[in-house]
Image (cartoon, grey):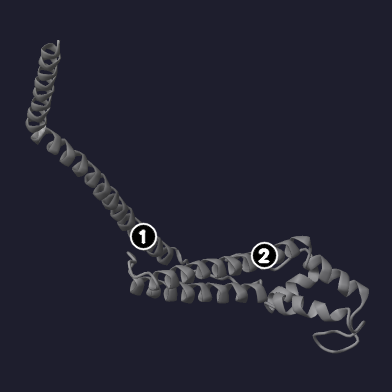
Amino acid sequence: WSKKIVGSSDVDLASLIAQYNSYDWVNQGRNYISKVPGICPFCQHQTIDQLFIEKLEKIFDRQYAEDANLVESLCQTYRQQCFSVLSEVDVLLQKEKANKFSKIDIVKLSELQGLLKSSFDLIQQKMEEKRRELSRCIELKTSSSILTELNNLISSANIEIEAHNRQVENIAHERRRLEKDFWHYIKADNSIYFNQHKNKVENCQKAIWNIESRIQENRQ
């Protein structure tokens, strides 16, 4: 963006254009030459001939066209990426506003959304100036600090969510352990009673068998 895109300087006409710093103006005027043959788009007189057209083509050569196309492509790509990022942030903001258990700082998220949009708009404005005037040097500011702060905000919320999930999992685990310990205690605490009951039952069974045996013997 700091590169001056001015075309080739190997043509004598280029020095005149450079003297008046008119590369962008001349380049824009080239589009009108073919519309009115022979008429100069700059002075509106019948001064255009084939030699003049060829000189312009040599100044604004293939390298100039490639540089211009690169600027155009970067502008379009950046515009699409900005739209995508802002859309994602907006979806997140609306989702978290509707979530009563949200772990993210919604006020801060909304503030960062506004700052990010302003930063993107300013950068795109500068890029558009470069696209219209390729000979200009443009200094682009970065949105990295805002994006870093946004990522940190989201990461902090994710850490809280993960900690909450672990806590829920621990509660479920502790509940299962408590139930197991409870029944183990019940079994241990009542084992003497169970054994006594078992012994009584066995003694009763033996007594019944003895009585039945005596009955049988008396019958005989």
| Figure quadrant of residue 115 | bottom left
Instruction: Using the image as rendered, state which of residue 191 and residue 137 is in the foreground.
Output: 191
* In the depicted structure, whether residue 150 falls above or below residue 210: below
Number of dots carrying numbers: 2
Residue at 61% across / 64% down in the picture?
3
Left or right: residue 53 compared with residue 119: right
Residue 91 x/y as whole percent: 48, 69
Q: For mark 2, what is the residue?
A: 73
Residue toward you, 53 or 158: 158
What is the quadrant of the N terminus in the image?
Answer: bottom right
Q: Quadrant of the C terminus?
A: top left
Mark drawn on residue 69:
none
Left or right? Give the position of 218 relative to 141: left
Residue with the mark numbered 1: 152
The answer to whether residue 204 shows anywhere in this view is yes
> Can you name the residue that lies furthest to the front here?
219
Q: Is residue 90 left or right of residue 79?
A: left
Q: Decide which of 137, 203 is in the foreground and name it.
A: 203
Which residue is pictured at 8% across the width and 22% down the height? 203
> Relative to 125, does residue 148 appear above or below in the rendering?
above
Residue 94 or residue 191, whichever sits in front: 191
In the image, is residue 67 above or below residue 181? below
**Residue 4 seen:** no
What amino acid is found at the position of numbered circle 1 in the picture? Answer: Asn
Q: Residue at x 50, y 66 (%)?
A: 88
Where residue 208 sits: x, y (%)?
Answer: 12, 22
Mark 2 is on which residue type? Ser
Mark 2 surroundings within 10 Å by alpha-carbon count, few (fewer than 14), some (14 through 19), many (20 or more)? few
**Label located before the other in sequence (1 or 2):** 2
